[in-house]
Amino acid sequence: MHAKWWRSGFFYLLLLVVIVALVFVAMAREGPEPLSLAEFVDQAKKQVNTIAYWQEGETLIGLKGDEVTHWAEYSKTTDDFNGLLQEYRINENVVQAEPDFDGSELEHAGKLKAQNKVGLGEFMLNAKRQIDIIRQRGNTLEGVRTDGTIAIETAFEGSTYELRDYLEKEGVILGTEGIKLDVKPGSFDWATIALTVILPIMLLGALFYFLFFRAARGAGTQAFNFSKSRARLSLDHRPDVTFADVAGADEAKEEVQEIVEFLRSPQKFQTLGGRVPRGVLLVGPPGTGKTLLAKATAGEAGVPFYSISGSEFVEMFVGVGAARVRDLFEQAKRNAPCLIFIDEIDAVGRHRGAGLGGGHDEREQTLNQILAEMDGFDTSANIIVMAATNRPDILDPALLRPGRFDRHIVIDLPDIRGRRAILEVHAKGKPLAKEVDLETIAKQTPGFSGADLANLINEAAILAARRGRKDITLKELEDAADRTMAGPERKSRVISPKEKEITAYHESGHALTARILPNADPVHKISIVPRRMIGGWTRLLPAEDRYLWTKSQFHDGLAVLLGGRVAEEIIFGDITTGAQNDLEQATKLARKMVTEYGMSDKLGPRIFGQRQELVFLGREISEQRDYGDKIADEIDAEVHDIIQRAYKSAKKILSANKEKLKQLAEALIDRETLDEPELERIFEGLSPQPTPS
């Protein structure tokens, strides 16, 4: 875990530097007011020469020579005037006091101007000298009051004699009748030194410490932690997932039940000399719940659960992955009994020698360490290793041998019962409407994995909230299933009436053909609302899960695929590109019937070509041709004949039921989507008929 920013030492050091800087700034600001030399001299000069009291005019007059600097109203006795001078500490040696002054001449001369009139307090402050002492301290002049405080200061470079001559020349009175001159030796200005020297050094030192020393120390720590395992451990709280949260995989849960028993009470097996498999490989398509089953196993046993992805072992540097494997197993031994889960183990367990890099490839070094650890820890170590993959065909054989991953548990796509159980698990806590039957949704979702079904329930809840409902109805669940399979509806897509009509007849051709043919699946829904890249779709709903397909089912399925193209030809006398995907699927199915399933009457029960496919992904990597050109021509001819037979069957059915085709298409144009009850009303009177020969 990362430390909180306020717990960092750098934060407190930076805070200390800021506080010290603020203190120094405050100290610098608390000093005297700095002035220029001319302003300093002007402050040192007398403000007034004479304070005159014109008793008859009830006025105090401040005179500087013959000029009136300011005046104030004052109606007191002479004794009060003398007391006022003493109160404000007026130096009578410097400022002359005239208590019996006649100011009538000044009044007649108009010198008592209104703009010079001030209050009594301001008058006395202006009359009092601003400073009493001029102190020379190095290259600084300080103006000091009587109480010892420094009022003003300025810079002056020169001797004391030069200072005295300069002040007398400027008219500043020195001596007993004026300002006292005091000379002190110079001292250091610590505030200035701190701000200009000490503070920058501290900041640079702190920056250097955290950029270099801490970075170097952190790099050393990371170097030691680089080889540590990144497995996530659920120790403080054991996994709260149990087998009750895993549905649709009953056989797999039975397989891992003995693992749970071993983790709970290993002595039960050890007293009988039994050895529980050390490694369990969970194999299955994506989204079938392999990780969930591993977590539930640890949750049922109540043991620590280490989970890590196979890709987290592999790094750029050789040896790091192997070191992480060693660290993972060391941690597991310290917390035994426990369960280690490696997800996507094919990222590191790929067959050695299959790629570039030879035996010194980092991935192969990591795999070698996994092999050594799984076969190396003693039998008393209560550690179970579980791994998951959907590519078991590419795993190294040494990884699959007894003593390592010697038990393989296949978790396939759930059947209809499993899908219903999964839907019930994910529907817990969600407000389903009373009429919702999850059995119906389970029937509509063949081929869905557990992750798909969880997403379906979530999509249904989102749709219900978007529609302002307080519960989830069957409508939201079916719309969510359609959305999951075919994508969201594109109702904003602009379609011309002609294209809409063609699409309606195309989908009606599929549906009507499926209704008539006996081996085709029942029609559940038709829609001409665009979804993703498709303009419309017909959804067939099998009555049950199917694992075996018959030849007649394939033939009827081909006819259903071609029914849309045939309907366009019958109604409009022309064909469109709308059947492109149908033709692609029909061609692939017909070729598989000939080359893979041995359903060709002409070529017989034989498989043509050796294929390599991605197990559980259904993707073909390559095909090795093991037949000649003549057989290849016969395969093409047989595929052509199968498709033509299906095309003729569909054309015969739709031509015989042309009126019903028009009725179905018109209803589809009007309502855009037809569900099973509406289709049953339209199909009333139609019953499955034998496949036309």
Image (spheres, helix red, strand yellow):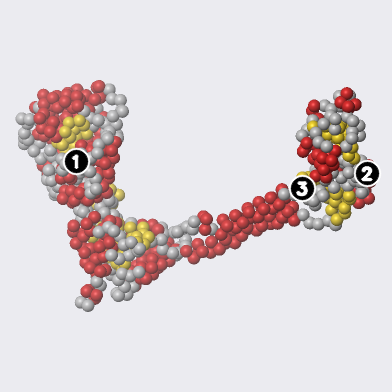
Q: Between tags 2 and 1, which lies in front? A: 2
Give whichever of 1, 98 is nearer the camera.
98
Q: Position of residue 373 (x, y in %)?
A: 35, 69
Q: Which mark is residue 168?
A: 2
> Nearer the N terminus, badge 2 or badge 1?
2
**Which is nearer the eye, 610 or 142?**
142
Amino acid type assigned to the residue bearing label 3 in the image: Pro
Q: Quadrant of residue 653?
A: top left
Considering the image in quadrants, where does the C terminus appear?
Answer: top left
Residue 64, given in percent of the width and then of the height, sits at 89, 35
Q: Position of residue 642 (x, y in %)?
A: 15, 38
Q: Nearer the viewer, mark 3 or mark 1?
A: 3
- Give the crowd class for mark 3: few <14, some 14-19, many >=20 residues within 10 Å: some
363 with respect to 246 (left or right) = right
Query: Which residue matches tag 3?
Result: 32
Q: Residues under labels 2 and 1: Cα distance?
A: 106 Å
The numbered mark, 3 or 2, whose residue comes first in the sequence reads 3
> Pointer 3 and pointer 1: residues touching (CB < 8 Å)?
no
Q: Which residue type does callout 2 highlight?
A: Glu
**Mark 1 surroundings within 10 Å by alpha-carbon count, few (fewer than 14), some (14 through 19), many (20 or more):** few
Return the x and y of residue 425 as percentages of the image width and height: 22, 51
Residue in view at x 22 percent, y 35 percent:
582
Q: Report the residue at 24% width, 71% height from top.
A: 265
381 is higher (above) or lower (below) than 16:
below
Q: Secondary structure at mark 3?
A: loop
Q: Which residue is mark 1?
A: 433
Q: CA distance from mark 3 to mark 2?
A: 24 Å
At 11% from the left and 24% from the top, the residue drawn is 659
Badge 2 marks a residue whose secondary structure is: helix
Q: Amino acid at mark 1?
A: Ala
Residue 470 in view here: yes
